Image (cartoon, rainbow, N blue to C red):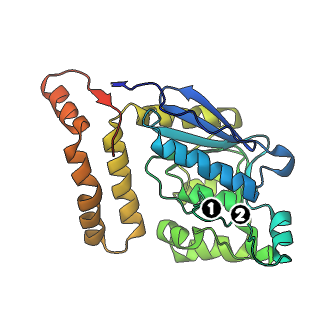
């Protein structure tokens, strides 16, 4: 299958904490690159991530994003040193809180994000993983929500999402003990899609991204929205109705649904156009 897109309408942001590259057609690779601090997420890093994700959702020529880390850590989560300093301030500059910014731990977005977990995913790192669409983990990856051992509670939206995904008892075990969990355990709980060797984790995540990016851009956005609607809404019929009204209606009005059906009838590969959803 093929796509006919114009060149990128806008260049990606050029952040300091993140490294942005394009390993495959219509795929962007975002690497957290602060290995000296285990890729801890400062407020500046969170703002950079927000800017890159906003660019990604707006850029019609990029259909899948892979997120990974440099060194032995995916990310160790919030920069606790900065957070501690903010507690002693006057309250006007809360850690990680800026108007309009949505952290990846709570971000819905339009397009899929694939986590390539290369190592430690602690605190906010595990919260990011729980909110990603597909997760590939290195066999040596370690996950944990150790906030309770630091006098904190997980605040990035993971509590409700974890209960929805793995159930109350497993979620309680992970959150209330703060213990470290292996990639194989996360795989058995349905929080990881695939476990691979350390050297293959980004390659496998990019492979998933390429498969996704070969499909209709409209259909990717629409189907993902329906999945997330169901995940986040307790009532199945309500979730379906809301998705039909907000997303599927837009899909039916677009060109790609017509192209897909025409290509099927004509026994040829579809030629997708950039999504306007």
* CA separation in Å, label 2 and label 1: 6 Å
Seen from the viewer's position, the closer of residues 220 and 275 is 275
For label 2, the SS is loop
Picture quadrant where residue 82 is located: bottom right
Tell whether 145 sits left or right of 216.
right
Residue at 86%, 64% in the rendered image: 81
Residue at 56%, 52% in the rendered image: 192
User: Residue tagged by mark 1?
Assistant: 127
Seen from the viewer's position, the closer of residues 116 and 4 is 4
Residue at 49%, 65% in the rendered image: 165
Picture quadrant where residue 230 is located: bottom left
Query: Does any portion of residue 135 appear in the rendered image?
Result: no
- How many other residues sit within 10 Å of disc 2, few (<14), some (14-19) or many (≥20)? many
Picture quadrant where residue 185 is located: bottom right
Q: Which mark is residue 123?
A: 2
Seen from the viewer's position, the closer of residues 146 and 89 is 89
List x then y, in percent, for residue 131. 54, 58
List x then y, in percent, for residue 257. 22, 38
For label 1, the SS is helix
């Amino acid at each position: 299958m093929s796509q006919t897109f114009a060149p990128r309408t806008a260049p990606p942001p050029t952040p300091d904490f993140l490294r942005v590259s394009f390993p495959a057609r219509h795929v962007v690779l975002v690497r957290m690159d602060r290995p000296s601090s285990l890729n801890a997420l400062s407020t500046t890093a969170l703002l950079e991530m927000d800017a890159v994700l906003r660019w990604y959702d707006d850029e019609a020529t990029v259909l899948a994003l892979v997120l990974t880390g440099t060194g032995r850590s995916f990310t160790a989560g919030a920069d606790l040193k900065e957070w501690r300093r903010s507690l002693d301030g006057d309250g006007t500059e809360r850690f990680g809180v800026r108007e309009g910014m949505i952290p990846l731990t709570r971000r819905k977005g339009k397009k899929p994000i694939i986590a390539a977990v290369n190592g430690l995913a602690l605190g906010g790192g595990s919260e990011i993983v729980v909110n990603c669409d597909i997760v590939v983990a290195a066999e040596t990856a370690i996950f944990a929500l150790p906030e309770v051992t630091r006098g904190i509670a997980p605040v990035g939206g993971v509590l409700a999402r974890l209960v929805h995904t793995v159930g109350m008892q497993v979620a309680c075990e992970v959150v209330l003990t703060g213990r470290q969990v292996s990639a194989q355990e996360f795989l058995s709980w349905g929080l990881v899609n695939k476990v691979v060797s350390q050297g293959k984790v980004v390659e496998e995540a990019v492979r998933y991204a390429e498969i996704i990016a070969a499909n209709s851009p409209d259909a990717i956005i629409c189907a993902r929205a329906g999945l997330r609607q169901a995940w986040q809404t307790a009532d199945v019929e309500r979730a379906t109705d809301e998705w039909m009204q907000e997303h599927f209606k837009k899909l039916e009005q677009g060109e790609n649904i017509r192209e897909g059906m025409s290509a099927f009838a004509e026994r040829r590969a579809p030629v997708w156009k950039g999504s306007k959803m």
